[in-house]
Amino acid sequence: MASKKTKKTIQWLQFRPTDFQKEIFRKICGLVVVIFTASTALSLISYLFTWVDDASALNDPTMMDSSKEIANWGGKGGFRWAYLMVGRLFGAAGISWIVLLSYVTAKLFAPEKYRLLRSFFLIFTATYILSVFFSFVGIH
């Protein structure tokens, strides 16, 4: 009896997805990244125009109440995400992450055409350089 159970367990562990299943999984992940990229783009672009209106809400403990209005196109969550990306981490160069996410999406839909590691390095370097440049311009 124990040998049948062990045999079933081993067969289950040896499951290998077919190429079609891998492709479907990759496309579903691509759709998830597309949705995340679009919401990030809306939030970041809106943040650049509406941050003055929404800045007072950051220190308000009741910001997440339904009665508070936020001008960001991504809503309250989008405003928080954009504030993290632009206000805390990368400055205006945080928008370059939209390019990176778009590239990841393209890689998921057409893996043979794009080289992700090289592109990630270039975009991350450009983000860092732009952040330093905008900081320098902002100081002077």
Image (spheres, rainbow, N blue to C red):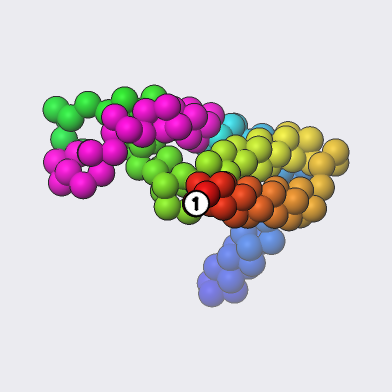
Q: Which residues are magenta?
A: 38-63
The residue carrying mark 1 is 139
Residue that sits furthest to the bottom in the current view: 2
Residue positioned 69% across, 61% down in the render: 14
Please state which amino acid type lies under the numbered disc 1. Ile
Q: Is residue 16 part of the magenta span, yes or no?
A: no
Give the residue drawn at x 25%, y 44%: 58
Could you say where residue 139 lies in the image, as x and y percent from the top left? 49, 51
Q: Is residue 25 visible?
A: no
Residue 83 seen in render: yes
Residue 82: give x, y in percent of width and height. Answer: 43, 40
- Residue found 63% across the figure and 63% down from its top: 13
Q: Identify the image quadrant of residue 22.
A: top right
Q: Is residue 86 left or right of residue 134?
A: left
Drawn side of residue 18 relative to residue 69, left or right: right
Residue 2 in which image quadrant:
bottom right
Q: Residue 53 in magenta?
A: yes
- Secondary structure mostly taken by the magenta-highlighted segment of the chain: helix
- Occupied quadrant, residue 7: bottom right
